[in-house]
Amino acid sequence: MSALQSVAGKGHATGREIYDVVVVGAGFAGMYMLHKLRGLGLSVRVYEQGGDVGGTWYWNRYPGARCDVESMQYSYSFSDELQQEWDWSERYAPQPEILKYANHVADRFKLRSDIQLDTRVDRAVFDESANSWQVAISDGNTVTAKHVVLATGCLSNARMPDIKGLADFVGKVYHTGHWPHERIDFTGQRVGVIGTGSSAIQSVPIIAEEASHLTVFQRTANFSIPARNAALSAEERRSWRADYPEIQRKAREETRNGIFTEMPDRGALDDGDNERRAKYEQRWTRGGLTFMSVYNNLALDKAANDTAADFVRHKIAEIVKDPHTAKLLQPNNHPIGSKRICIDSDYFATFNRPNVTLVDIKSNPIEAILPNAVRAGDKDYEVDALVLATGFDAMTGSVAKIDIRGRNGQTINQKWAEGPKTYLGLMSAGFPNLFIITGPGSPSVLSNMIVSIEQHVDWIADCLAWMRDRDLVTMEAKKDAEDSWVAHVNEVAHTTLYPQANSWYMGANIPGKPQIFMPYIGGVAIYRQTCNDVAAKGYEGFTMSVAERPQKLAAS
Ligand code: NA7
């Protein structure tokens, strides 16, 4: 019997189950991991704290929530039948449609029988004598797993701001990342939105249409590009599908961010003013994230970046009629793209509505929330409902919430106290047989997440099959390989403009969180090649151990 074959219980845990793999989370990463591991004949149990599959798309139900990568590229590629049969209705699918897709995948691949919903993984402790994990789940049971895969998501740990008086507010308080399941009707209400990141930028135009008055509290202005969302025609879908293999190969092997688009061949300063403006104008008209890939040095050269930033600031000034409001909405404290660029549908134009007010809480910070108002700069803004669009404890937050103990009882939070430390973003030394999907140190949130998820899942599955073939029972990142990878991730980040922004990429949005640039900025193509090379060299940088053979009894 191979080291990874074992007897697994079905249904709810009784406390005696032994799984080859426990997967934490049933979002896009967890679902594909389950499917892939089943294909290897492994026993797998997925625990999901939400009431259904979908991960971030299960929780982020705020008005206007939609994907910022075009849907034809934000789809699984592992099944040709799936990608040929699923019809996205819009260029950027709205959240309900993405959630429907997640449910379709769960049903189509019959995943549900191995997914336990409404169940948190509270604790995972590595048992060094048995080379396995003891995983304590919120139904009170503990199961054993040879391997644990954290598919916990990067933007799934909604962050409640610590604002004085918030608990005393008498109206309803909603967090965009933890939105109720029923439709919230703001008709006739005075609504306050705190935060102006992507979630606010998507929801503000919709809330403004319903609310009697909307007050947006802005600490940092953000760059946003029009989405130009539209219905997808059958012809457009057909043309994507006809070229899928080549589009996907290019996205994986030739791009930095896993999004197929024309590759820039020159820097912004290689063109004259008129030509450059024409190119920006063309991308602005086309809409979407690819605005940033018009030139190849926007993330690297401040002078080049300024040309794109100036173009967008100019557009904001053109759209927003009140010059004071326009000025406030123009970002001026970070390079464009160094915080995740937003894409919107009429965000800036919403501030021309008579029922919308922008409040600058950078100059006049929020002092307190009163029972029926937000007090900022000695002024009380009366509101009936509050929307907190204040973001997430990104990349590490959902890992940190689980009490994970590796060798010698060390917790992952102790190990990561000064910032996350991983080898390839996949494993952390001292935590054998524990994989992280799209973890810190991998391209992750800088990329099309589906592309990065599929790459990690495939790599992990290949690795487990390789271990099984060789009767290997543990795999662990070597400390020196991890140290050099962490240094490399940091070094590459600092060749770019990204660390110049106080972004959630840097952990800067969470008071007290170490400020380290968390994702790997080298790009998905280089990263994939690195991971493949590591595997081809017998998982270089990892230690593997074989199962101890049972001792033969000495003849008496
Ligand atoms: P983000 O991008 O982290 O935005 C959060 C916003 O909330 C941002 O404008 C913050 O201002 C603001 N914020 C956070 N805490 C406070 C407090 N205490 N007071 C006032 N304002 C605050 O989160 P999103 O949910 O919008 O988007 C996350 C990602 O999801 C996005 O990038 C897409 O990839 C999808 P700050 O900038 O910190 O000054």
Image: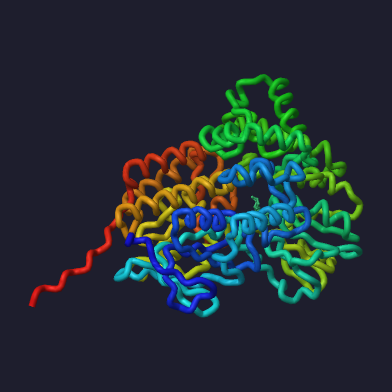
Place residue 68 in its image quadrant: top right
Return the residue nearer the eye: 295 or 99. 99
Q: Is residue 243 above or below residue 78?
A: above
At 41% across and 55% down in the image, what residue appears?
427
Q: Residue at x 72, y 66 (%)?
A: 367
> Is residue 496 found left or right of 169 in the rendered image?
left
Can you see residue 219? Answer: no
Q: Would residue 549 appear left or right of 418 to someone viewing this image? A: left
- Quarter of the image where the C terminus is located: bottom left
**What is the number of callouts on the image?**
0
Image quadrant where one finds the N terminus: bottom left
Answer with the quarter of the image where residue 28 lies. Answer: bottom right
Residue at image x 60%, y 30%? 303
Q: Position of residue 131 (x, y in %)?
A: 33, 66
Point out the quarter of the image occupied by ligand 1: bottom right
In percent of width and height, residue 458 lies at 47, 48
